[in-house]
Amino acid sequence: MKQTIDLGLVETGELTKIFDVIWMLRMEGTAIPGVIAHCAHGRRVWTISTDELSVVINGDSASFTGAYLIPLTILANAGRQNAANGDITLTVEGDVITAHSSLGKQTATCSMVAIPPTPSVKWSPSRASATLGGSNLKWTFFSGANAPFEAGLSGDDEDVSSPDHFTVEIRNGVFQAYSDWTSAKLYPMRGTTSAETSGTAVVNVDPDFLAVIFQCVDSDSTWTISFDSSEPHHIELRSDTYHIIAKMTKVPVVELHERVLRVLEHEKFEHQTTESGLIGVRLDGVTVSFDFFQRESDETPMVRLSTIITRDCNESAELLREINCHNQGGSVVRLWYADGAVTSAIDLFPDNLHSLANRLRHLVREAGRLRGVLEPFAAEDALPARRTRRRRRPSTVERQPEVWD
């Protein structure tokens, strides 16, 4: 006889919170296999996750073992606004889940899954936080980041003219959100409120994050929002009921990194990524590293494709002359000497990413040719050490990623 697992009585308020999240994902066209329910510390816990968003909802008291992937329909039918069936009791028997309500019962298949790990973000001393009421939090986002009242009335293409991000900031007892709508022939906006703050940080955020705020943040609870300017990949929101982690910040270098990976996968290049994000590609026996930077002048992101031409070479006059001659010839491949190695590289900006595959192949071909040209000069006697009264700056060495151990 199959054992019946009682997930407990789920009241309307708890169901509504779950429905608001899954409805938000449906409106965005994001598919998820279901909602995971398990029990922790005497409370029912609901986990809803995508590649960019993790939402954990702490429910009422419950006592059961295991974790269950529940179909969306079971929860949506009970949790949608004005649902007539009210509270429900959920039971699992084998691979069937039943929602018992005052109107009857609904059944669907479900599956037992592993208990999901507790979501977390990497802690760092530069992570800032602001604690404030839910009403203040929602009002600040609405006032500083939501579309202006006049948006869409000018007849222009809204997708083209709308800003691709808004900015949130924590500083000195203040939390604020602001956005610039001048590209839509409107005006900048800023919403500011007082908060209990720790640290200072500023991040740019994808407008899709507004749906998370408006669907999940309840006005009566106290919320803590935190993020990190130096590692601006995750925004964390916490209340007594919710724990939300959203990877919805707009980081140009990170977005470029993701685009590069998509190109490499599409072109089927052999590649690996290190924990630090460095990408290594192996093509025709040549290892090429992909390093990501942001120009200080205008903060434009760029990716540098580089490979070492020759190692353990002498800094001879002939070698340096050949390097300078090559660089002055107008080639897209640049050369430099540092600490006994000659490196070749090509820099690419986001607008030129369509040529990534061709540039990579060109760099590899040039590496083979230049190796034959430069190695004889690298064996020449090194220049005598230059005497200088000034202290020399330590050189930064471009090194290949050891991604194939």
Image (spheres, helix red, strand yellow):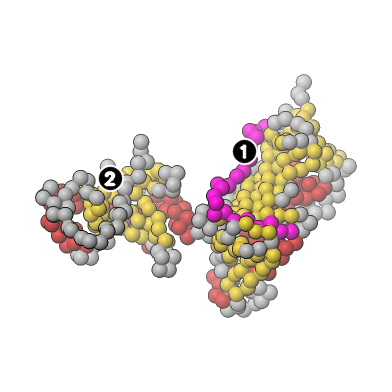
Q: Is residue 118 magenta?
A: yes
Camera-side residue of 266 and 58: 58
Picture residue at 66% right of the left edge, 76% below the top = 150
In this view, the mark in front (2 or 1) = 1
Q: Is residue 349 magenta?
A: no
Percent x, y for residue 305? 33, 54
Residue stretch rendered in magenta on the structure: 110-133
Percent x, y for residue 343? 26, 52
Question: Where does the N terminus fall, quadrant-wise?
Answer: top right
Q: Residue furthest top?
A: 1
Percent x, y for residue 117? 62, 38
Camera-side residue of 28 and 337: 337
Picture residue at 76% right of the left edge, 23% below the top = 2
Q: Disc 2 or 1, which lies upstream in sequence?
A: 1
Which residue lies under the disc numbered 1?
117
Which residue lies under the disc numbered 2?
286
- The correct choice, above or below, for 78 with respect to 216 in the image is above
Picture residue at 79% right of the left edge, 36% below the top = 62
Residue 181 shows in the view: yes
Residue 147 shows in the view: no
Q: Amino acid at mark 1?
A: Pro
Pointer 2: residues within 10 angstroms few (<14), some, or many (20+)? Answer: some
Percent x, y for residue 281? 35, 46
Q: State the SS at label 1.
A: loop
Q: CA distance from mark 2 to mark 1?
A: 39 Å
Left or right position of 137 against 348: right
Picture residue at 22% right of the left edge, 61% below the top = 389
Pointer 1: residues within 10 angstroms few (<14), some, or many (20+)? Answer: few
Indicate the quadrant where residue 346 lies.
bottom left
Q: Amino acid at mark 2?
A: Val
Give the label on residue 186, or none: none
